[in-house]
Amino acid sequence: MERTLIIVKPDGVQRGLIGEVIARLERRGLKVVGLKMMQISRELAEQHYGVHRERPFFASLVEYITSAPVVVGVLEGPKAIEVTRATVGATNPVDAAPGTIRGDFGLTIGRNLIHASDGAESAEHEINLFFRPEELISYERAVDPWIVEE
Ligand code: UDP
């Protein structure tokens, strides 16, 4: 089992798409093991997007992600990182396939609705950045054996 971090970004919240975005990932079979609303501080944004510090879009990215509340979640499932990225779609919504979250709801790279961890290392780092261990819940769903064979 794998865990990954998602953020419904400020545009997703403002556009009333929190439920829509999370529903698509839930329907896929992924299990929500952590979920909260917050407004990201500048410090947290700079830590989260630290790898992009030298990129030209860094300042506007930090401005965007801190501009209004977000919903942060942790999803669990087999290959959760890869499955979530595939459900989210390409970084630039212009390139994102129809049927993906960004491909169905986005138009520009600077307003692409959702973040999802891009690898095992970043998932662990990001989950620890946004959640304390006691905020993550391990639990069984009665439907689990109908989603993942034992
Ligand atoms: N971004 C941007 N302009 C760019 C590239 C990226 O505004 O030219 C933003 C966009 O919100 C993206 C985020 O920076 O989601 C992080 O970029 P990354 O390449 O890590 O894409 P992601 O993992 O989110 O698909």
Image (cartoon, rainbow, N blue to C red):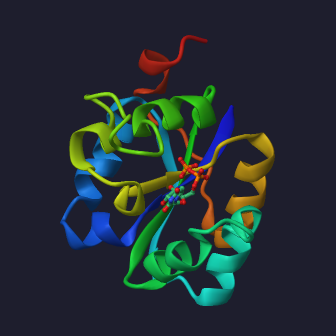
Decide if residue 131 is in sight here: no
Quarter in which the N terminus is drawn: top right
Residue 15 appears in the figure: yes
Q: Taking 113 as reference, is 15 left or right? A: left
Residue at the image point whose x is 48% and y is 30% from the top:
86
Quarter of the view holding residue 8: bottom left
Specify the quarter for ligand 1: bottom right
Q: Position of residue 42 (x, y in %)?
A: 61, 88
Indicate whether 40 appears above or below 119: below
Q: Which quarter of the figure is the C terminus placed in?
A: top right
Q: Which residue ends up furthest to the front in the rendered image?
A: 56
In the depicted structure, whether residue 79 falls above or below residue 70 = above
Which residue is at the front of the view, 50 or 54? Answer: 54
Where residue 24 appears, as percent x and y from the top left, is: 31, 39
Which percent across, then down, holds residue 54? 74, 69
Of residues 8 and 109, the one nearer the viewer is: 109
Residue at image position (52%, 18%) is 148
Q: Is residue 131 left or right of residue 101?
A: right
In the rendered image of this protein, does residue 143 appear above or below residue 63?
A: above
The residue shown at (36%, 72%) is 10
Q: Looking at the picture, does residue 13 appear above or below residue 136?
A: below
Nearer-the-camera pick, 49 or 22: 49
Q: Quadrant of residue 143?
A: top left
